[in-house]
Image (spheres, rainbow, N blue to C red):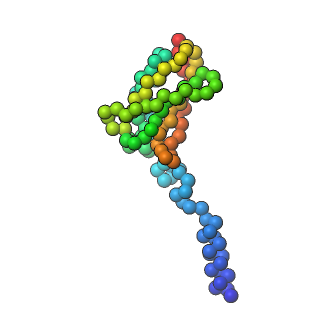
Amino acid sequence: MKKSLLGLTVLAACAVAPSATAVPSAQNGCWATVKLSSMPQTRVWVVNVTPLQHGTTTLTDAKPRVEVRVKGSWTVFRAKKTAKPGVYRARVVFPSAGTWRFRVWDGFEPMCARYHTYAPVHLV
């Protein structure tokens, strides 16, 4: 009786224990930084975006994008691969002068991608 009760307890504990790899996290290598070649200074901004796993390793199959907004919804500018592996280029057009927010989606997909946010910029 004691052995079967112990066996059921162990079995129940295993059934409710979370998987260590089920959720992406910094502990399992699921994080990246983004290096930008420049910051926006004019209404047309051509920028190289380099997503870096652990801040050092280029992500050659990433799908990064730059998003901007002044009010309302975000406008998306997809970055395209360049000749240099792991470096992507986006041509961002700010539709008008003003103070704009922007963010970069690092494209570390499918489960690890996240936004990187920056201080708003004022463009004339």
Whether residue 113 is visible here, answered yes or no, is yes
> Would you say 2 lies left or right of 42 here?
right
Q: Residue 81, image x and y in percent?
A: 37, 34
Residue found at the very far bottom of the displayed protein: 1
**Res. 41 visible in picture:** no
When the figure is inspected, residue 1 is found, relative to residue 25, above or below; the finding is below
The residue drawn where x is 50% and y is 52% is 27
Vertical comparison of 37 with 1: above or below: above
- Comparing 10 with 77, the one in front is 77
Could you say where residue 31 lies in the image, as x and y percent from the top left?
49, 45
Residue occupying the point 48% across, 38% down: 106
The extreme top residue here reads: 124
> Which quadrant would residue 11 be assigned to in this image?
bottom right
Residue 84 horizontal side relative to residue 116, left or right: left
- Residue 1: x and y in percent read 68, 88
Task: Using the rendered view, name the quadrant where residue 122 is placed.
Answer: top right
User: Which picture quadrant has residue 63?
Assistant: top left
In this figure, what is the number of numbered marks? Answer: 0
Measured from the top left, where is residue 62 in percent x and y? 43, 40
Q: In the picture provided, is 63 more to the left or to the right than 17? A: left
**Residue located at (43% from left, 44% from top):** 53
